[in-house]
Image (cartoon, rainbow, N blue to C red):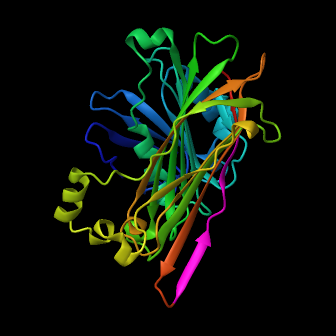
Amino acid sequence: MRLKEPAAYVLVLIVLAAAHPQAWGHTPSIGETVLVDPMGRITAYIYNATQVTDDDLTRVAAALLEGLPVVFVGGGAERLLDEAEPPITLGNLDDVKAAGVWRHLDQPGAPVSVLLVRDAFYTSESLDAAYRWLDEQVEAPSGNLTGTYRLVAVLTEVDRELPLGVLETRTEVLRVMDAPGPGLIDLTVTQRLTPGSAAGVSGWRWSSLEYAVEGSAPGANVELSSYDEPPTEPPMGIFTLLWRIVTLRWGDLVPWLWGDHGVAWTDLSDYGRHQYHVRIEAPDDSEEAGEPLEARHHLVLKAADGADPVFLTWAQAGYVKGGFLSTERYAAPPTGGLLSIRP
């Protein structure tokens, strides 16, 4: 019997009497997995997607209405989204091995969290990602902001491309309340790219990460209203100079000896095409290439009159392995798809 890592939860597995003994292992093989707190109250349901019955779907619907998170794992996990009908949906559901839906009834406006874990094959790490998602904090705007913004949904995507790396993308969707109709949609996107070298599973390092939101793509109907510009290089002030000396980053201190080092952000956005597009790159031999990359994007979209917002969102990571004499490069397939929102 597997215990969930945080001490605040106890894992109880309810199985049929004829279930295989391995049903008590890491992945439920039949029936339902129930998370309960120390008081014995149910806090979440996890189902093996290949074993879900009509009776299970009835309990799933009831759990979602009660504000309890539900997770499907295994092949066909994306079926949960059809049953739950969350206010945010993604068109590309290929290779989804875990999906979750959670209506936060304790938050203003009852925002909904959605989880998508993609992997070529189902592994236990897909379930681990679901456990981490259950611990994610969701905070709707409060105080004076409640009259201006309403949190609609939070989409968490975990794209596993090991041994290359893992890309996690969290998209928070807020509606600007004083805008007419669907009006303005405020997006805050945070990403974490962990290369295989940082995860301890391979020698692959990351070389680039691109993220884009396209409002003029086929099926999309939004305009790019505004966005935060990507960060620029840090200033060469006294503090920066001393910091580089203390940390012995000589390649940054005297780049003319080692060439250009450090992470570079390139803004490829185009208001005319209603496209937000940023490319992040690291030199192959830099320290940053072997460490996790964290990125943040913030933009505002204007929806077409009388229509729910729809836009294309995608991300693509590039990886590199080897050295000067023998270098391998690989570009992972783009992830994402048409994102639809029902504010």
Query: What x and y, as percent, mark residue 313?
Result: 66, 43
Q: Is residue 334 magenta?
A: yes
Identify which residue is drawn at 26% across, 51% down. Answer: 237
Identify which residue is drawn at 45% across, 34% down. Answer: 44
Drawn side of residue 5 relative to residue 94, left or right: left
Query: What x and y, as percent, mark residue 138?
Result: 42, 29
Q: Is residue 234 magenta?
A: no
Question: Which sits in the foreground, 335 or 6?
Answer: 335
Question: Which sits in the foreground, 108 or 192?
Answer: 192
Question: Which sits in the foreground, 196 or 78?
Answer: 196
Residue 22 visible, this orientation? no
Work out which residue is located at the far right of the displayed protein and give it.
218
Residue 120 visible, this orientation? yes
On-image quarter of the C terminus: top right
Residue 270 quadrant: top right
- Range shown magenta: 326-338
Drawn side of residue 279 relative to residue 202, left or right: right
Does residue 290 sit above or below 146 in this rendering?
below
Query: What x and y, as percent, mark residue 11?
Result: 36, 43
Does residue 6 sit above or below 299 in this rendering?
below
Identify which residue is drawn at 39% across, 71% down. Answer: 286
Does residue 284 sit above or below 277 in this rendering?
below
